[in-house]
Amino acid sequence: MADTNITSVSEFILVALSETPELQFICFVLLLCIYIVTVLGNLSLILAYQFSPDLQTPMYFFLANFSFLDICYISSTVPKMLSNMMSRNKTISFYGCVLQLYSFGVCGGTECYVLAAMAYDRYNAICHPLLYNIIMNRKTCFLLIAGSWIIGMVNILIHSILTFKLPFCDNKINQVFCDIPPLLKLSCIDTWTNELVIFCTSGLVILCSFTLIIISYIHIILSVLTIHASTGIKKAFSTCTSHLLVVTIFYGSIISVYLKPKASYATYGDRLMSVMYTVVAPLLNPFIYSLRNSDVKKALAKMVHPLLETRKH
């Protein structure tokens, strides 16, 4: 029976953000604009790092990688959401769902540790300024990014295998994209094992990365308190506030969705929360970092200025 159920599900039906046609069109236009702005905003940060000699530092290396990750993150869900909004048949194939869940999960898990790597970078910059270039050398930076991707890939691979081996009695996912909690609710059998694995492995990924961030900032705060000059304190905190704001948005929304039992998975509330960390967070990140960072603003201005001059002539 389990094998029959598994093979019989050739596609899943995704719910819409809104069932009202007028609101559906507004959601489509809004989501399309958010997607375009997010891709262009994060792409501009990558180009600023790539072509600005002043930004060739570990801090901006991590920021450029984080921007690339955000483009992959939002691209794993939003294009299909937009397609379904303009279609009466709001479906995704079985293997399309597997691919979407895996790519989305890789980006989510990787982002946890890239944020931790960025916190570690800020810790060394503020607490060990004289040794900063030695500690945060090019090899270390690449290893931190590579390690983040490996953790993200392994974590979601475990969940993907366990989730799609389940027999499904229904194919209507109560979510706008393929995600683990709503898929578990479609299973014909008890998913207690899956929930336990999610809680342990995802909890470990989230908790370990979040703990690393907290430890880094505890040391940063203690170090900053020893800086007597107000300008020194201001400069030290200005490099951290943007990162802390991104951490708060990302971890706050993702913890509220994944670290709770399947039975308490709400319908509309969790859908909105999922949109928060899959759509809104990648949109805000380039603005948070660029608007609060004078070096990024200068680099972007240098990039835009020749284009403006070319148009004038």
Image (spheres, helix red, strand yellow):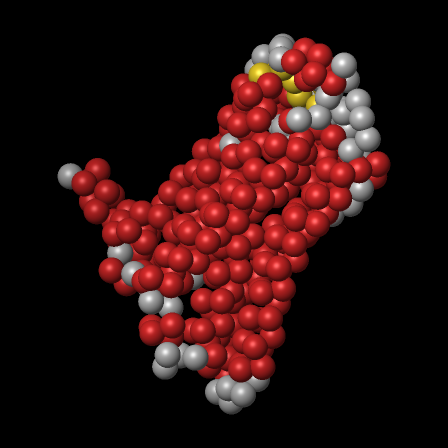
The residue closer to the viewer here, 84 or 195, is 195
Q: Is residue 240 above or below residue 220?
A: above
Percent from the top left, x then y, of residue 109? Answer: 56, 46
Q: Is residue 8 above or below residue 226?
A: above
Count of marks overlaid on the render? 0
The image quarter in which residue 97 lies? top right
Q: Is residue 220 above or below residue 57?
A: below
The image quarter in which residue 220 lies? bottom right
- Residue 46 in sight from this viewpoint: yes
Percent from the top left, x then y, of residue 162? Answer: 66, 33
Q: Is residue 285 above or below residue 209?
A: above
Give the residue displayed 58% in from the left and 32% down from the top. 101
Percent from the top left, x then y, of residue 121? Answer: 45, 67
- Residue 301 in sight from this viewpoint: no
Q: Is residue 304 left or right of residue 132?
A: left
Give the residue displayed 58% in from the left and 16% down from the top. 93
The image quarter in which residue 173 lies? top right
Give the residue displayed 76% in from the left and 25% down from the top. 187
Residue at the limit of the structure toward the right, as seen here: 263
Give the residue displayed 25% in from the left and 52% down from the top. 51
**Picture quarter with the N terminus:** top right
Percent from the top left, x then y, of residue 287? Answer: 48, 50
Q: Is residue 53 left or right of residue 111?
A: left
Q: Is residue 304 left or right of residue 90?
A: left
**Picture quarter with the C terminus:** top left
